[in-house]
Image: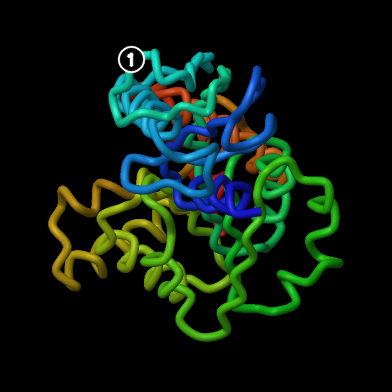
Amino acid sequence: MEWLKAVQRLREQRVPGVLVTLTSVRGHSPREAGAKMVVSAERTWATVGGGNLEAVAIERARAMLTEGGGVPESLKVSLSDKAPYQHGVQCCGGEVELLLEPLPVVPSVAVFGMGHVGVELARILARHDLELHLVDSRAAQLSPDHLRGLDDAVAGIHVHEVPVLPELVISELPEGTHVLIMTHDHAEDAALCDAALRASQLASIGLIGSSAKWSRFRAKLADEGHTPEAIARITTPIGLPDLGGKEPATIAVSVAARLLQLFAGVSTSSTTDVSTEQQAR
């Protein structure tokens, strides 16, 4: 179904839209009850009947997108030639009711590195309504067996197996993605940090590791031309500062909790660091 594919596409690309459903029909109508269409700011998919009916629905849907409200609305449209028309006469003789439902933009997270912490983090994040990108240069780390526990995920799961240059995935991530870098290879981590700083669409960049690791990375990134202001976009260590422990599951809980704060717009100076000993590798 075209409308269903459109909903999925908008969700994956983090683009807002409105789902329009023809909920009831009295008399004659171009489409039967249950017909659906999807409206974004730029285009539409499928149809609820064309003509004035559809034009009115599109106009109101785009007004909802501009207003930014998240509450569904009902809309009645008369198809009588005696009714006022904004977009031409449609005289089927019936009356229809439309339900306009905003399609929310869900968070997007990319985890680079499906090691112990990465897998634990994926398991936690998979229980939330978001788009989750899992990236690793090692095929075994992305196998169904290694990622067991994600089969019934609430999140949309996107697996990226990239044996060479995993940093190329950065440019493919949707606008507003939160990136977490925790691979098995510090050279790979460094390349990902460089690529992330060169990308303009990311919401946040997190790097797991110790203060010694970050000191080396900061110098390397500066040598590659990144300004101090740009380098400061990277948060390291990651997670909540007051949740100690070195177990992968504990670190994953800490990082996931901080992400949930970011999703909610919480930003305080006390939530930017986790014990460097906890993340030392």
Task: Determine the residue positioned at 45% across, 45% down.
Answer: 14
Using the image, determine if residue 10 lies above or below residue 274: below
In terms of image quadrants, where is residue 39?
A: top left
Are there few (<14), some (14-19), or many (20+) residues within 10 Å of tag 1? Answer: few
Helix, strand, or loop for circle 1?
loop
In the image, is 115 to the left or to the right of 183?
Answer: right
Where residue 13 sits in the image (x, y, percent)?
45, 51
* Residue 175 in sight in this render: yes
Front one among 103 and 203: 103
Nearest the eye: 134 or 5: 5
Position in image of residue 75 (x %, y %): 49, 15
Q: Nearer the viewer, residue 129 or 234?
A: 129
* Residue 79, position as x, y percentages in the image: 48, 22
Task: Look at the picture and state if 44 lies above or below 257.
Answer: below
- Name the residue nearer the viewer: 195 or 7: 7
**Can residue 267 be seen?**
no
| Residue hosting label 1 | 84
Give the side of residue 60 with respect to residue 150, left or right.
Answer: left
Q: Residue at x 62, y 60 (%)?
A: 158
Relative to 31, residue 168 above or below: below
* Residue 225 on image: x %, y %: 14, 69
For this orientation, the residue located farthest to the bottom is 164
The amino acid beneath tag 1 is Pro
Would you place residue 120 above or below residue 98 in this image? Answer: below
How is the model colour-coded? rainbow
Figure quadrant of the C terminus = bottom right
Q: Residue at x 64, y 65 (%)?
A: 159
Q: How many marks?
A: 1
The residue lying at 66 percent from left, 63 percent from top is 114
